[in-house]
Structures are given as structure tokens and as C-alpha cells.
Amino acid sequence: MLTIATIKDVARIAGVSTTTVSHVLNKTRFVSEALLERVNHAIAELNYQPYGLARSLRRKLSGAIGIVIPDNANPFFAEVVRGIEDKCFENGYSVFLCNFKSQGGYEGFKKLVHANVVPTAIFVCNDMMAIGALNAAHELGMNVPEQLSLVGFDDIALASLIIPKLTTIAQPTYELGEAGAKLLLKRINDKNRPESRIVLKTQLIRRDTCGPA
């Protein structure tokens, strides 16, 4: 029986991840010459034909999924996208990113203070904006956490490296992207599939930017 090679087979033979194979195929990111040679050798050895291309020709679909994110410089979104990419690549889809900028916590906090709104505690929607608010507070001479308690959201690596270390809400970032991609792929394959909801656990990470109430 004829066995059709998959992207996982290529990754296994080349000794790389499926994400790397997809980037080689789609030319979406830089891949070193050494890895490029290994992947291309595995493709030739297996006579691999990208599933997404064959499927696109049959169904007249692009085989590409677009991701819109607020800020590709935010490590949180990079990890979410990695989860989405891995799941999409496994299923023969390519991924492209669209990026738009959102107002940072630095400017937002300064606007509050200049408008004579001086909070004693702030919960910020992501860690990068929380770090921006923290920098603005220091510039304005406010002590954290003595005068201002600050909590972020995401628990990116930088949160534990700054001074004071950021109190934040941790969430399973990679799993968030992977779960979202799974739901999307199921809906693509079955447009009549009912909506479903997945709840992922979060955790409060207590560090140095929150004082006693």
C-alpha cells in the first residue's frame, strides 16, 4: 500500500519541528542553511507533497489562516501564535500574521495622572502594558507598591526580571493558541458544528508590585 508522507514525517527525518518544516516550505521565517539543507533532503527522500497545496487545488481554498494580533513585539502573542502555528501546520495549513499597535500602559497611566486621576491600584490587561505603567509611575515619583499596586496579566518571562518584579496572572499561553486553532480547524471542516467553549486555568503569581490592601 502506498503511504503518503506527512509534514511530521519530514520533521522526523530532518530532526526538526513541524514548525521549522512549514517555515521552509512557506518561506515565512529565516531558517539556517544547515536546517534548510536537512529539511530539503528529507522532502526529497520522502517525495513529500504539501497536503495544503493538494487540498487547496481540490477545494479551491487558499489553505492559509490569518492571525490578527495587537503587537507582535509582545512575548505573550509570540507564544500564542506558536501554539496556533504548530496545530495549523500539523493539519496542512500555512499561517500569516497581521499586526496593529495598541496604546501602551506608559502613555495611558500618564494620561490618568495628568487628568488628576491618581489610582492606588491598577489591573492591566497584559504584562507589557503593566511594565509601561510601572515605568511611568517611577518617572512621576510614585513608589510601587507603597503608593501604587500594580497587577499584570500573562506572566511573560520579563515579568520576573524587572525591579520590582511584577505581580501578574499567569495563563497557559501556548495551550491557548493551540486550543483556539483546534476549534477553528474543526469549524473549517464542519461549518455546521455548534459553537463550543474551552476554559483554561489561570494562576495569580504574587511578586513585588502589590502592597497590602
Image (cartoon, rainbow, N blue to C red):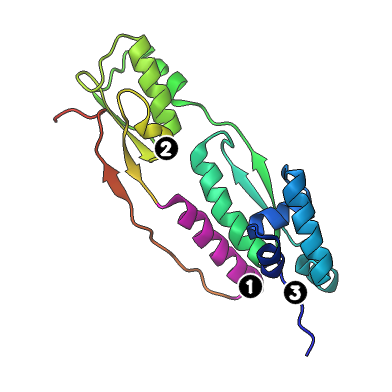
Q: Secondary structure at mark 3?
A: loop
Residue at which label 2 appears: 157
Q: Examine the rendering and report whether any part of residue 126 can be seen.
A: no
Please determine whether, in this image, residue 116 is positioned above or below residue 90.
above
Q: CA distance from mark 3 to mark 2?
A: 37 Å
Residue 134: x and y in percent read 36, 22
Residue 174 magenta: yes
Q: Amino acid at mark 1?
A: Lys
| Residue at the disc numbered 1 | 191
Secondary structure type for disc 2 = helix
For the N terminus, the quadrant is: bottom right
Disc 3 designates what residue?
A: 5
Q: Which quadrant of the view contains residue 40?
A: bottom right
The answer to whether residue 203 is visible is yes
Instruction: Name the foreground residue: 112 vs 213.
Output: 213
Residue at the spot x=47%, y=68% of the render?
Answer: 196
Q: Position of residue 3 (x, y in %)?
A: 76, 82
